């Protein structure tokens, strides 16, 4: 299959191009679309066959459910069996934006979308191109990140091309994603809301709207094979470049001394570390700016592959605010291998 890449203006998406994507989606085809978090691999969420082809294209395990994307508030009610007041408050406060809410699944959503679970994950992206394409398609769109399963999520159309060339008919290119890590996933199906995946919408922000929110232990710790994961995506090795990554916890000086003692390795560092490093490096933002780290992390992991890195020592980010999302992705890229200095 020939993969077409079309560029589109994020501020003023050309309707003809939007409709081209919308038409393919209505016909049951896959289209990679930009969102504010990462690029998504979209299909008509109400078409079980189209949704199945997402799993094939990604090489995604069948038991890992997908997020359904809507463009407008009235898109939510038909997809869920019930809408608790706290979930409604979250939608009101954070949509459109990088928050996914898990709710009881309505029968209209094919079971394959949720990998057989009786819940469904819903999000309203804020990216103008994503919303225009959902509206043009006229159906909700199931869309996981548009990477091959296991590799870092794509934050540019070029990343999508690396993974999906020849596999899907269309990639819509609206430039680099602003957030850079996937949405916060919060489950609202039991009395206590639980964060299953941290993202740009933080625990503190959620708590300001609905009170206490828990963080699932799988966010920071390895989910053992024998335990049922709250979110199936937690079990899988994720976000990993080809290199072996170690996460190193320590201050800038200790980190740089440590990495300098490994002359063949690469550093995945902060900007502030660069002057002290004697080894090859890729930086992922500033040590005090978690948003810059989120924006750059996946690009930097792919860059390490491009440079042929075999061993990478990554400086650990703070676990607070958006930093928790960065830490969550990096610890998985490192297969939970931590070096404490
Ligand atoms: O920002 C994002 O969320 C991006 C863009 C494209 O919107 N999408 C994304 O999708 O990251 P994906 O499939 O890569 O990640 C979805 C995560 C997985 O960890 C999955 O296990 C979890 O959400 N998930 C989906 N439905 C769920 C459900 N019903 N219950 C628990 N976890 C669910
Ligand atoms: Mg993903």
Image (cartoon, rainbow, N blue to C red):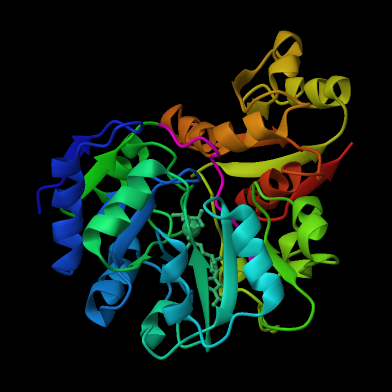
Q: Which residues are magenta?
A: 176-186
Which one is in front, 71 or 229? 71
Q: Is residue 200 magenta?
A: no
In the image, 311 versus 222, the foreground residue is 222
Image spot of residue 198 (x, y percent) = 68, 55
Q: Quadrant of residue 335?
A: bottom right
Residue 32 higher or lower than 53, as above or below: above
Q: Quadrant of residue 1?
A: bottom left
Residue 178 in magenta? yes
From this view, report whether residue 171 is shown above or below residue 300.
below
Residue 148 position within the rendered picture, expressed as x and y whole percent measured from the top left: 38, 56
Using residue 240 as the reference point, say whether residue 263 is left or right of it: right
User: Which sits in the foreground, 187 or 258?
Assistant: 187
Q: Residue at x 30, y 78 (%)?
A: 46
Q: Residue at x 13, y 42 (%)?
A: 16
- Give residue 225's position: percent from left, percent from top: 66, 78
Q: Quadrant of the C terminus?
A: top right
Q: Main secondary structure of the magenta part?
A: loop
Q: Which of the two residues, 307 or 161, is positioned nearer the viewer here?
A: 161
Q: Is residue 33 at least partly visible in the picture?
A: no
Q: Residue at x 87, y 25 (%)?
A: 254
């Amino acid at each position: 299959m020939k993969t077409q890449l079309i560029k589109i203006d994020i501020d003023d998406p050309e309707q003809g191009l939007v409709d081209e994507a919308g038409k393919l989606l209505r016909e049951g085809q896959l289209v990679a679309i930009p969102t504010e978090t990462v690029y998504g691999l979209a299909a008509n969420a109400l078409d079980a066959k189209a949704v199945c082809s997402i799993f094939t294209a990604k090489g995604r395990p069948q038991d890992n459910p997908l997020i359904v994307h809507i463009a407008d508030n009235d898109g939510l009610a038909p997809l869920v069996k019930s809408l608790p007041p706290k979930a409604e408050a979250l939608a009101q406060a954070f949509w459109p934006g990088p928050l996914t809410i898990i709710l009881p699944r309505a029968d209209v959503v094919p079971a394959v979308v949720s990998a057989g679970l009786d819940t469904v994950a819903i999000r309203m992206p804020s990216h103008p191109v994503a919303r225009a394409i959902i509206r043009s398609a006229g159906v909700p769109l199931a869309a996981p990140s548009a990477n091959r399963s296991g590799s870092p999520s794509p934050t540019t159309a070029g990343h999508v091309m690396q993974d999906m060339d020849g596999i899907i008919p269309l990639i819509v290119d609206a430039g680099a994603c602003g957030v850079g890590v996937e949405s916060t996933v919060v489950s609202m199906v039991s009395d206590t809301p639980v964060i299953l995946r941290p993202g740009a919408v933080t625990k503190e922000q959620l708590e300001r709207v609905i009170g206490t929110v828990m963080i699932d232990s799988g966010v920071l710790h390895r989910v053992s094979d024998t335990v049922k994961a709250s979110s199936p995506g937690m079990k899988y090795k994720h976000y990993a470049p080809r290199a072996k990554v170690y996460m190193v916890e320590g201050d800038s000086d200790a980190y740089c001394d440590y990495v300098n003692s490994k002359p063949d390795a690469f550093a995945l560092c902060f900007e502030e570390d660069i002057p002290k490093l004697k080894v090859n490096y890729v930086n992922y933002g500033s040590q005090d700016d978690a948003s810059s780290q989120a924006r750059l992390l996946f690009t930097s992991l792919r860059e390490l592959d491009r440079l042929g890195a075999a061993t990478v020592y990554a400086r650990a980010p703070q676990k607070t605010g958006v930093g928790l999302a960065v830490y969550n992705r990096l610890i998985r890229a490192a297969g939970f291998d931590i070096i404490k200095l």
